Amino acid sequence: MGAGWLRVLAGRGVLTVGLAALAAACGSVSAGSSPGAGQTPGTATPTATPTVTPPAVPVLGPMTYGTFPATPHGADALTLCEQWAGLRGQYVSRVQADTPYQLEQWFSSAVWRTAFTANNPLRNDPAYSHIDVAFGLAATGEAASIASARWLDQACAAAD
C-alpha cells in the first residue's frame, strides 16, 4: 500500500474513524448515537423515510436502505446513501474505465458534494463508522472498486 493512498484515506477521516471504532470496542468511546432532540434514553426513535428509490445497477445488484433513525446523524447517513444510490450506476462504468487520478477528479466534482457533506459528521459517530469507512474507500481513487461499491451498498442496507 503506497504512502499516497494512506495520506488520502487519512485526509478523508477514514483512519480517524478506524481508531474511533477501535477505541469504542475497547470501551473508551460510547457506542451508539446520542438520543435526538426531545428523546430520552430508552425511548423509541422514529425512523427517517427514504425519498430516493435506488435504481437497478446490474453489476452491483439491487440496493436497499436499512432503517435510519430520525436523528441528525441518521438523516445524514440516509442522505449519503441516497446520494450514493444516484451515483452507483455511473460509478461502475467510471471505476472500470478511469485511472485513480480521473476518479479523484470526479469525486471532487459537484455531483459528489452532497454525499461528502452528509458524510462529514458521521466521522465522529461510532454508530455510523461502517458507512463512513465504506464511503471513504469507495470515494478514493486508489481504493475505488466494485468490491468497495458493494461494501457501501451493504453498509447502507445495514444502516444503524
Image (spheres, rainbow, N blue to C red):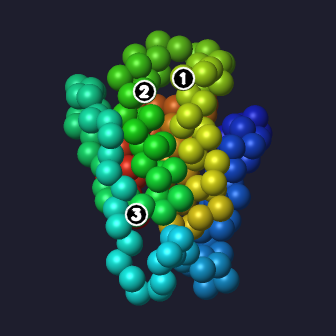
Please name which of the two marks, 3 or 1, marks the residue nearer to the observer. 3
**Residue holding disc 1:** 111
Q: Secondary structure at mark 1?
A: helix
Q: Which quadrant of the figure has residue 12?
A: top right
Q: Residues within 10 Å of mark 1 (few under 14, many from 20)?
A: few
Of marks 3 and 2, the one in the foreground: 3
The reply to whether callout 3 and callout 1 are in contact (CB within 8 Å) is: no
| Residue 2 image offset from top left, x and y in percent | 72, 37
Task: Verify CB contact (< 8 Å) between mark 2 and mark 1.
Answer: yes
Quick check: 95 above or below 77?
above
Label located before the other in sequence (2 or 1): 2
Query: Quick check: 98 above or below 8?
Result: above
Disc sitting over residue 87 in the figure: 2
Does residue 19 show up?
yes
Q: Residues within 10 Å of mark 3 (few under 14, many from 20)?
A: many
Q: Which is nearer the eye, 71 or 160? A: 71
x and y percentages locating residue 44 in the rendered image: 35, 78
The kind of residue tagged 3 is: Pro
The three-letter amino acid code for the residue at tag 1 is Val
Position of residue 9 in the picture relative to residue 158 (left or right): right
Residue under circle 3? Answer: 69
The numbered mark, 3 or 1, whose residue comes first in the sequence reads 3
On-image quarter of the N terminus: top right
Residue drawn at x 54%, y 23% as measured from the top left: 111
